[in-house]
Image (cartoon, rainbow, N blue to C red):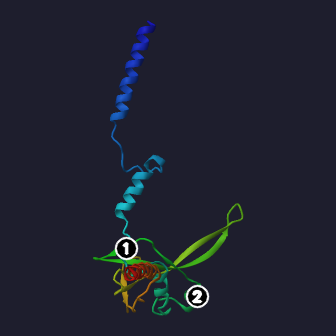
C-alpha cells in the first residue's frame, strides 16, 4: 500500500512539473515582479528615442530656451523667475520630426511627511521642443489638454555647445599632437 501511494504521488509530481514548465508566459505582466524587470527595460530601450543626434542638448538646450523672453514662452515675469527649467533625456517625435524637450516647472512645498521631510508638488508651466537640427522651436499650448503647438522664432544655436565643444576640442588636440609628432620626424 505504501509503495502504491509513493508511486502515485511521484506520478502526480512529474505531471505537475511538466504542466508548470509548459504554461504560457504572460509578457504583459505589470505586477512589478523583479523577474520581469529586464523585459520592461528591454521594451523601454526599444521605444526610447535618444537625443544623441540632436544639435543641442542638456544644459545648452535649457539655456537656449531661457534666452527667450517670458512673454515669448507664455510665462509671467514672476513665473519666469520661479521656474526651474528641466531637460528631458529622451527625444520626442512630433509629426515626422524629432525634438528635445525642455520643461518649465515651478516647485511648491505642500507640507511634511511623517518623518518631517518636505513634500513637493510640481506645476508644469511650459513645454518647449527644439528640433534636432535646431531650425525649429515649438511651444506646447498648456491651456488645453491637447498636443497643439505654436512655433517660436528659432534663434541661432551657438556653434559650440558644451558637450560637443569638449569632444571637438579633444579631437583637435589629438589631431594637432599627431601632426606635430609627424612633422618632427
Query: In this figure, which residue is indicated by the disc labeled 2?
Result: 81
Compared across the picture, whether 93 is left or right of 103 comes to left
How many neighbours does mark 2 have within 10 angstroms: few (below 14), some (14-19), or many (20 or more)?
Answer: few
Residue 11 rendering spot, x and y as whole percentages: 37, 19
Badge 1 vs badge 2, beta-carbon distance below 8 Å = no
What residue sits 35% from the left and 80% below the top?
Answer: 132
Q: Secondary structure at mark 1?
A: strand
Q: Position of residue 153 (x, y in %)?
A: 38, 92
- Which corner quadrant holds the C terminus? bottom left
- Residue 120: mark: none
Side of 27 relative to 89 (left or right):
left
Q: Residue furthest top?
A: 1
Residue toward you, 19 or 184 = 184
Q: Quadrant of residue 99?
A: bottom left
Q: Is residue 143 visible?
A: no
Q: Is residue 50 above or below residue 66?
A: above
Q: What is the x, y in percent for residue 171?
A: 41, 78
Residue 14: percent from left, percent from top:
37, 23
Above or below, comparing residue 59 to residue 156 in the picture: above
Looking at the picture, tell me which residue is in the foreground, 176 or 49.
176
Residue 35 in view in this figure: yes
Which residue appears at 42% of the width and 89% of the height?
Answer: 158
Give the farthest residue toward the front: 185
Q: Residue furthest right?
A: 116
Mark 1 or 2, nearer chain start: 2
Residue holding disc 1: 92
Q: Residues within 10 Å of mark 1 (few under 14, many from 20)?
A: many
Could you tell me which secondary element the residue under label 2 belongs to?
A: helix
Comparing 16 with 168, the one in front is: 168
Q: Give residue 116's quadrant in the image.
A: bottom right
Amino acid at each position: 500500500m505504501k509503495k502504491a501511494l509513493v508511486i502515485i504521488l511521484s506520478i502526480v509530481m512529474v505531471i505537475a512539473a511538466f504542466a508548470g514548465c509548459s504554461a504560457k508566459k504572460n509578457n504583459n505582466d505589470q505586477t512589478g515582479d523583479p523577474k520581469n524587470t529586464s523585459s520592461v527595460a528591454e521594451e523601454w530601450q526599444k521605444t526610447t528615442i535618444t537625443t544623441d543626434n540632436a544639435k543641442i542638448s542638456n544644459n545648452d538646450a535649457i539655456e537656449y530656451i531661457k534666452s527667450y523672453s517670458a512673454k515669448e514662452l507664455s510665462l509671467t515675469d514672476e513665473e519666469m523667475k520661479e521656474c526651474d527649467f528641466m531637460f528631458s533625456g529622451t527625444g520626442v517625435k512630433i509629426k515626422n520630426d524629432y525634438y528635445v524637450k525642455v520643461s518649465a516647472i515651478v516647485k511648491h512645498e505642500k507640507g511634511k511627511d511623517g518623518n518631517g521631510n518636505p513634500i513637493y508638488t510640481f506645476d508644469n508651466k511650459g513645454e518647449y521642443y527644439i528640433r534636432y537640427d535646431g531650425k525649429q522651436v515649438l511651444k506646447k499650448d498648456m491651456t488645453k489638454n491637447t498636443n497643439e503647438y505654436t512655433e517660436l522664432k528659432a534663434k541661432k544655436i551657438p556653434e559650440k555647445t558644451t558637450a560637443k565643444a569638449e569632444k571637438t576640442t579633444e579631437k583637435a588636440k589629438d589631431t594637432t599632437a599627431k601632426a606635430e609628432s609627424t612633422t618632427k620626424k
